[in-house]
Amino acid sequence: MMDKLTASVGTALDRFIQQKQEQFPYATGELSQLLRDIALAAKIINREINRAGLAGIEGGVGSDNVQGEAQQKLDMIADIRFTRALSKGGETCGIISEEIDGIIDTGNHHAKYVVAIDPLDGSSNIDVNVLVGTIFSIYRRRSPIGRPPTKEDMLQQGTEQIAAGYVLYGSSTMLVYSTGYGVNGFTYEPSLGEYFLSHPNMKCKEDGSIYSINEGGYNTFPEGLKSYLSTCKEREFSARYIGSLVGDFHRNLLKGGIYIYPSTSKYKKGKLRLLYECNALAFLAEQSGGMATDGYQRILEIKPEHFHERTPFYVGSPKMVKEAMEHLNEYEEEEVVSVKTIKVKA
Ligand SMILES: O=P(O)(O)OC[C@H]1O[C@](O)(COP(=O)(O)O)[C@@H](O)[C@@H]1O
Ligand SMILES: [Mg+2]
Ligand SMILES: [Mg+2]
């Protein structure tokens, strides 16, 4: 359905959500409430992040999450705050969080939505005052209303997302999300405690000249990727890497560019998690005219098997993602031929 009402810059988030809901005669307001729950929790996290150095909430908690990564205090605080806001809000029946092994059952068994969330993205940047984020995906549950959330509710393909977004805690705090009708960005005004529309109808540029990748693992990158990176360097593209996925994605969305987290010897399937990092950003990328793949297939079509499964991630300007994939496929074909040749010779 075409977006009849184009909200103008400065529209308060609450009003924007209401306007969108009114465009759907059968909307019941549950998704609107869920989005408000996320926006509320993000305000609290924003406050915690801004005063982290003073409040002694920097550093680790001395435990690892299910992926064996050291958990930071702010990882846990963010996880608790989002879980609490979503549980109290009443519209979320189950949550998958980066910080928790299994399904978080909120007890809201009457609710029809489930959420996958990376409460704090870019944890390695918390203590060095570099921007961090939150990433979330929202799905309609599959299991009958009234029951506890199930594995099937949480392990849905990215194409099934009802909404997705991120919060960026940077020089300003922004909430960027989509409900499947374009991508809109809101800037938080702390003195008023409110978000206002600042980036309506965000569009990803067809092409760009920024590439974002941690080249530390270069020696173990797929040959095709090495070849693509050479072309980026030949063209003197700008290398930009914050080390916070949300920040790198946001910059490339605004300026044009490609973000890559490939398979490496340390992370055979890439480092990033499908359910609460890649699916959400792939949804936003496609909603804004960008592209997101694992190098070979659309991220949104990957059928998840595990809550914390990882995937290689190639996202951004479609022309750049397509070219990177061409290089990957070219080298893959050559590798197949060379194996066949060796076999024939043997
Ligand atoms: O340090 P690396 O290997 O480049 O990884 C950085 C990537 O890892 C992440 O920090 C992973 O996310 P979390 O911080 O939520 O675990 C991404 O934000 C970032 O893009
Ligand atoms: Mg993350
Ligand atoms: Mg995280």
Image (cartoon, helix red, strand yellow):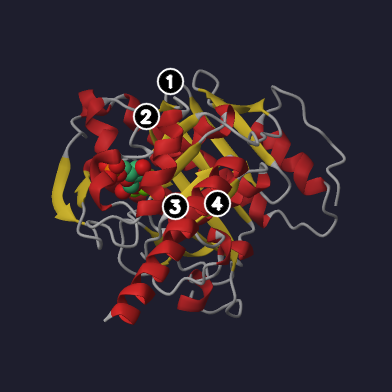
Name which residue lies at 44% across and 43% down. Answer: 228
Mark 1 to mark 3: distance in Å?
Answer: 26 Å
> Which label was assigned to residue 292?
4
Q: At label 4, which amino acid type do we have? A: Ala
Callout 2: 10 Å neighbours few (<14), some, many (20+)? many
Considering only order in the chain, which callout, 4 or 2, is on the residue closer to the N terminus? 2
Horizontal relation, residue 288 to residue 341: left or right: right
Considering only order in the chain, which callout, 3 or 1, is on the residue closer to the N terminus? 1
Pick the residue in front: 260 or 49: 260
Residue 117 percent across, percent down from the top left: 44, 54
Q: At label 1, which amino acid type do we have? A: Ser
Badge 3 element: strand
Considering only order in the chain, which callout, 3 or 4, is on the residue closer to the N terminus? 4
> Which label was assigned to residue 171?
1
Tell me the mark number nearer the camera, choosing from 1 and 3. Answer: 3
Mark 1 to mark 4: distance in Å?
Answer: 27 Å
Residue 136 percent across, percent down from the top left: 49, 51
Q: Circle 3 is placed at which residue position? A: 313
Mark 2 to mark 3: distance in Å?
Answer: 21 Å
Q: Using the image, determine if residue 145 lies above or below residue 319.
A: below
Question: Decide: marks 4, 3 in contact (CB < 8 A)?
Answer: yes
Mark 2 to mark 4: distance in Å?
Answer: 23 Å
> Which label was assigned to residue 306?
none
Badge 2 element: loop
Mark 4 to mark 3: distance in Å?
Answer: 7 Å
Pick the residue in front: 274 or 341: 341
Question: Decide: marks 2, 1 in contact (CB < 8 A)?
Answer: yes
Q: At label 3, which amino acid type do we have? A: Phe
